[in-house]
Image: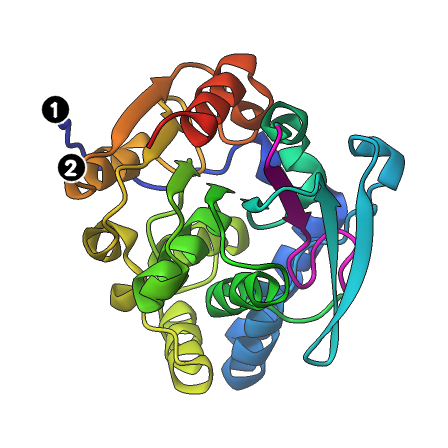
């Protein structure tokens, strides 16, 4: 496999375009950080761990014949959706500021005899309770959902959810699925910081303090969340899909990941970006054929 390498900086695609209200919040946050840095770090931490408000999706937007459950989790709840009743469980894991609805294109194609498909909303996302969350929490939530429904046969994970999935599997080898498909995964916690910094425009000093706060209170350290390193411990010849024109998570991330992931098949797409890739018929077909295909 030929790996291309290039320097890159994170830019914000249309998914992260800011409206007037958000631009005003950005300005207010910068003023707060400049005039009262200690308070500014606390406010920045709040925004880093809380998603922007979005309208909850309606259940009718998901494929029919689903069973929806609300699971008590920590100080809130997690909403899960289940299709099928087979023994082979396939989990769909969404990304940051996303939800189960974004993964719906994979549900019906995966519903073959013997399979069960489970999609769920991470904390502070979709129909789950609104609360602070972060990369480690995403991984812990996936582990919790698996403890409720059973060990995965397959996992299809997108973006931030892909990073959390690799983080979990690298720490708990007992949960390794037979099939793992990662779509446009984020490289590490540091990547999330870079995107957040692009959106907020905060100074390097404030970002450093924010980083140290997360490390101290939430046991999150960027170098320990780098999936191009963590993937080496996951002995699954999986499927990696990334778009060459992804402006949120550069394709160089997938290039490096593909090199580190022994036996993985790497599929590049064009002009789909970061979110439309989940709606593309070829991507859905490739992921489905891989999950349902021979080992």
Look at the image and tell me in which quarter the N terminus lies: top left
Q: Name the residue under label 1.
A: 1
Q: Are marks 2 and 1 in contact (CB under 8 Å)?
A: yes
Identified at 68% across, 53% down, the residue is: 121
Q: Does the magenta stretch include residue 292?
A: no
Provide residue 238's location: percent of width, then percent of height: 31, 37
Residue 58, above or below 49: above
- Main SS, magenta residues: loop
Identified at 16% across, 43% down, the residue is: 260
Identified at 46% across, 69% down, the residue is: 136
Residue 21, above or below 181: below
Magenta stretch, residue numbers: 113-129
Q: Distance between the residues labelled 2 and 1?
A: 8 Å
Identify which residue, 246 or 206, lies in the foreground. 246
Residue 291, above or below 193: above
**Element class at badge 1:** loop
Identified at 56% across, 76% down, the residue is: 40
Q: Residues within 10 Å of mark 1 (few under 14, many from 20)?
A: few
Provide residue 218's location: percent of width, then percent of height: 46, 80
The colour mode here is rainbow
Provide residue 185's location: percent of width, then percent of height: 40, 42
Left or right of 163 on screen, residue 282? right
Total numbered labels placed on residues in the image: 2
Provide residue 249's location: percent of width, then percent of height: 40, 38
Q: Mark 2 points at which residue?
A: 259
Identify which residue, 190 or 139, lies in the foreground. 139
Q: Earlier in the sequence, mark 2 or mark 1?
A: 1
Left or right of 78 on screen, residue 90? left
């Amino acid at each position: 496999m030929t790996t291309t390498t290039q320097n890159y900086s994170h830019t914000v695609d249309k998914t992260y375009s800011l409206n007037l209200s958000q631009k005003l919040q950005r300005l207010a946050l910068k003023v707060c950080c400049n005039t009262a840095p200690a308070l500014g770090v606390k406010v920045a931490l709040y925004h880093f761990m809380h998603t922007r408000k979005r309208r909850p999706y309606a259940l009718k937007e998901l494929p029919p014949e689903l069973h929806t459950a609300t699971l008590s989790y920590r100080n809130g709840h997690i909403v899960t959706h289940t299709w099928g009743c087979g023994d082979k469980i396939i989990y769909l894991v969404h990304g940051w500021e996303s939800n189960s609805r974004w993964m719906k294109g994979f549900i019906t194609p995966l519903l073959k005899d013997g399979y069960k498909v489970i999609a769920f909303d991470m904390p502070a996302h979709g129909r789950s309770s609104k609360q602070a969350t972060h990369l480690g929490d995403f991984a812990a939530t996936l582990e919790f959902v698996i403890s409720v429904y059973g060990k995965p046969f397959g996992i299809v994970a997108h973006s931030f959810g892909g990073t959390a999935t690799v983080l979990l599997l690298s720490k708990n080898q007992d949960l390794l699925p037979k099939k793992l498909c990662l779509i446009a995964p984020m490289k590490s916690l540091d990547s999330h910081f870079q995107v957040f910094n692009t959106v907020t425009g905060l100074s390097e000093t404030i970002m450093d303090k924010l980083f140290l706060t997360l490390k101290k209170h939430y046991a999150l350290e960027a170098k320990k969340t780098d999936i191009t390193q963590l993937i080496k411990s996951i002995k699954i010849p999986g499927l990696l899909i990334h778009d060459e024109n992804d402006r949120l998570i550069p394709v160089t991330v997938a290039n490096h990941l593909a090199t580190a992931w022994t036996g993985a098949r790497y599929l590049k797409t064009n002009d789909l970006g970061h979110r439309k890739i989940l709606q593309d018929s070829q991507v859905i077909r490739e992921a489905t054929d891989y999950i349902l295909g021979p080992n």
